[in-house]
Image (spheres, rainbow, N blue to C red):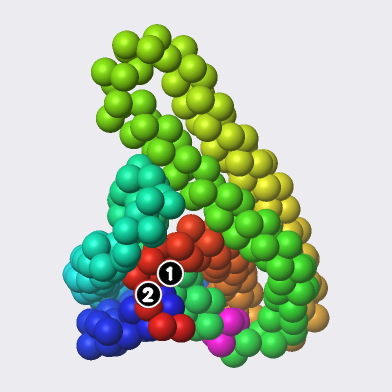
Amino acid sequence: RIWKLTLTEAPLFTLGLGFLVTSSAAKAYQPLAFAKVLSTVRGGGESKVWSEEGAYVLGLSLAQALCSGLRAWTWGSMQTRLVDRLRRAVYNALLDQDLQFHEERSVGELTSRLSADCSAVAEVFSLRFNIFFKNLVSLAFGSAFLLWTSWRLSVSLLLVWGVLSVVTRWYGGFVTSLATQRQELTAKVNEAAEESLSLIQTVRSLGLEDQSKEKFANASAAVSEVEALRFSGYALFHGASTAISSAILMLTLVLGGGLVAKGMLTVELLIASILYVDQVLQASCHVVDEFASLLRVVGTSKVVFDLAQLDV
């Protein structure tokens, strides 16, 4: 349903995707260009030659920066329009519900859906989509260039993707479940605050201040417990992915050195391959991380889409 909402702004999304692909392509070619410059300098080539290569690298960097800025502006504009449309749809749907619906739910819960849940959906378009697609395209371009420079070294990436797929399966389900719990508990926190503050005269006259504080504290503590679990899971995931990336990078360096010693790979291509491996490893970890974040937001946005009565 998030994807269906995105397609209502298909022209802006497509334009931003075009800028993203162009930016990622420029970034993907940079390691090979850097390797050519270093190889030229190392070989004692003429200054004119490596100056031209350096200017080419600079041109790629400027193109990447320009397209990255245009992509951010395009998708940022799209995010503003989409969240506004969603927020209005939720509000209109709430007003159209019968009285029984409103009697079964507190005002604090409904306003939480309009504010916190819609803000969670806004995070998808303003940040998560940007980072996820950027790293996904970088991963594709980087893998293609690495396969071209050295297919033998690119085989090591299969180990990374195999392990990360297992980790992602566990971590994604974990954060999705916690995200749903967190939004429900956050709604209860808002409900407890709205209940006591809207009836402050009654609370004061009956001496219910301590009871209201205790109720709010218990609701807030429940949210903190879920957040502690989420950060513990993230720490394990981040530590595991970092360790895997470091091990694969060292393995690539050892294998690449052996290929150079046997004359099966040039120093220039070894430098480019190591840069590509590092780029692909970082992109892989970011893709997995952002995919888990998208799953977390999906868990938090389920109720708000149900309230907006959007068809699947």
Whether residues under marks 2 and 1 lie with C-beta atoms below 8 angstroms apart, the answer is yes
Q: Name the residue under label 2.
A: 309
Give how far across and how far down residue 18 sits, in percent: 30, 86
Cα gap from disc 2 to disc 1, whole angstroms: 5 Å
Q: What residue type is labelled 1?
A: Asp
In percent of the image, x 32 and y 64: which residue is there? 98
Give how far across and how far down residue 287 sits, in percent: 55, 68
**Residue 9 lies in what quarter of the image?**
bottom left
Q: Nearer the viewer, residue 96 or 177?
A: 96
Residue at the front extreme, as displayed: 100
Give how far across and how far down residue 90 sits, in percent: 29, 65
Q: Mark 1 points at which residue?
A: 306
Which span of residues is magenta-colored? 142-146
> Looking at the image, is 133 positioned above or below residue 264?
above
Asked if the stretch drawn in magenta spans residue 144, the answer is yes
* Element on which disc 1 rests: helix
* Element on which disc 2 rests: loop
Asked if the stretch drawn in magenta spans residue 98, the answer is no
Give how far across and how far down residue 62 sits, in percent: 25, 71
User: Dot 2: within a 10 Å radius of its alpha carbon, few (fewer than 14), some, or many (20 or more) residues?
Assistant: few
